[in-house]
Image: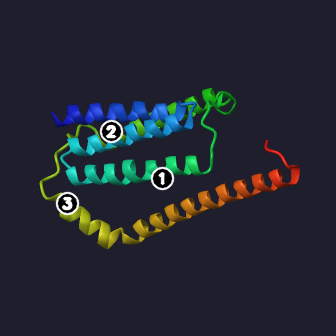
Amino acid sequence: MTTALFSIAGAVAIAAAVLVVTSRRIVHAALWLVVALGAVAGCFGALHAEFVALVQILVYVGAIVVLVLFALMLTKAPTNPLPALTTRRSPFAAIVAGVLALLLGTGVVIAFGNEKIEPVPAGSATDVGTAVFRIWVLPFEVLSVLLLAALIGAIVLSQRKLSERSDRLSSSGKED
């Protein structure tokens, strides 16, 4: 049963990830990212790692995707379809993605062979908490500073665009 749930969640994650990459609207891509990350949380749940699944939902779905959508709205990124930017190199990108997927899949099969997925024993939240706050505390803090820098950069870019527009309006005396 664990293998079946894991496989279903994995298939949903892969399908949603393909839709993230192939979506022509950036907001739709961000929403498909929510589905993909939720399916990854489902994979963790199928492996009985409930704590990691909840952290996946809270941190990635609840914070990262909201940050991406917030940055899109703050910078006034175009939300209409952008076919000119996505269609020219799509066949080459699909070939490269297929070759990489084949190589990675072959590597996983060679490395793990016929091993079965075993559920994690209960009480793994303590182990994860210990690892995060003892071993991984520096990368965790570096990531938080990186996200803060991205948010500040989005604010600076949006303010620059607003000041350039107000300068154009004041010099021409009319709106665009």
Q: Residue at x 25, y 65 (%)?
A: 129
Name which residue type carries label 3: Ala
Can you identify the residue that label 2 sits on?
A: 39
142 sits left or right of 121 in the view: right
Residue 146, given in percent of the width and then of the height, sits at: 52, 64
Q: Nearer the viewer, mark 3 or mark 1?
A: 1
Query: Most extreme residue toward the right, as rendered?
Result: 172
Res 125 label:
3
Res 67 label:
1
Query: Most extreme residue toward the front, as rendered?
Result: 173
Cβ atoms at labels 3 and 1 below 8 Å apart: no
Mark 3 falls on what kind of element?
Answer: helix
Name which residue type carries label 2: Ala
**Distance from Cα at disc 3 to Cα at disc 1:** 26 Å
Q: How packed is label 3: few (under 14 Cα within 10 Å), some, or many (20 or more)?
A: few
Mark 1 falls on what kind of element?
Answer: helix
Task: State which quarter of the image contains the C terminus.
Answer: top right
